[in-house]
Image: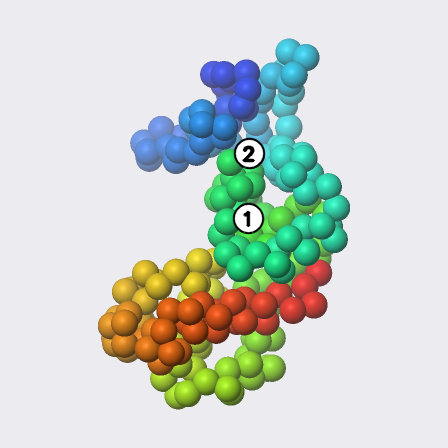
Amino acid sequence: MKLVIVDPIPPVIAISTAEEPRPKYYIHGKQVTILAERIEYLDESGKLVTESLRDYSKKALKKQLAWLDDFLERWRSAERKQTIIEELAAEGLLLDPLTEEVGKDLDPFDLICHVAFDQPPLTRRERADNVRKRDVFTRYGTHARAVLEALLQKYRDEGVTGLDDPRILKIAPFDAMGTPLQLIKQFGGRAGFERAVHKLQSALYDKAA
């Protein structure tokens, strides 16, 4: 299939599967269209470059994440993991199509470590199961533990990273457990809820990579 370059920088990724609407992505504020697993673009010297989506993604990541240890520290210290993902996306990481190519069962952390640093990944299921084995929810009451268990299941099944966003409590299965306000009260308030979720996330990535 033919790849088309529309704008020299950022790269335009093209595919001609016609009927379905093409997904839209933005790099440095410019829209690009994902159409294939290979991309074609002009580099800074004006040379036409063709490479795989995976190779392009690795280069984009390494521009922002020179060393694995730096990334691990940045990830562990960030209370909102989604912030890191958004920052990398703004610099050219096309996470959704990369996930489609490399593996839907990997979360962004493992995807980045695997693509950028050639690390063997763990699946979301494996990370969630490791948390369950350590039984990290014992300090919480019955209802709070149920919420944390449901959040962990949400991560395992869907790869949700914004677990500390209270808006997640408006959707299934949480909507059947109580209102967001009622559920947050089980943790002593929003601050307590966020602390509990951050501990859950820390447990997910404990001894990561």
Q: Is residue 181 visible?
A: yes
Q: Which residue is mark 2?
A: 92
Q: Position of residue 85 (x, y in %)?
A: 53, 47
- Mark 1 residue element: helix
- Mark 2 residue element: loop
Q: Position of residue 57 (x, y in %)?
A: 61, 37
For the residue carrying disc 2, how many other residues have a C-alpha within 10 Å: few (<14), some (14-19), or many (20+)?
A: many
Colouring mode (rainbow / by chain / secondary structure / one colour): rainbow
- Mark 2 or mark 1, which is nearer to you? 1
Q: Amino acid at mark 2?
A: Gly
Specify the farthest residue to the top.
46
Which one is in front, 59 or 201?
Answer: 201
Q: Is residue 15 visible?
A: no
Residue ID at (52%, 71%): 200
Residue ID at (58%, 62%): 123
For the residue carrying disc 1, how many other residues have a C-alpha within 10 Å: few (<14), some (14-19), or many (20+)?
A: some
Q: Position of residue 15 (x, y in %)?
A: 46, 28
Residue ID at (53%, 59%): 79
For marks 2 and 1, give the CA distance.
Answer: 13 Å
Q: Which residue is mark 1?
A: 84
Residue ID at (47%, 65%): 155
Q: Amino acid at mark 1?
A: Ile
Which one is in front, 80 or 206?
Answer: 80
Q: How many marks?
A: 2
Q: Are marks 2 and 1 in contact (CB under 8 Å)?
A: no
Mark closest to the chain's N terminus, 2 or 1: 1
Which one is in front, 161 or 49?
Answer: 161
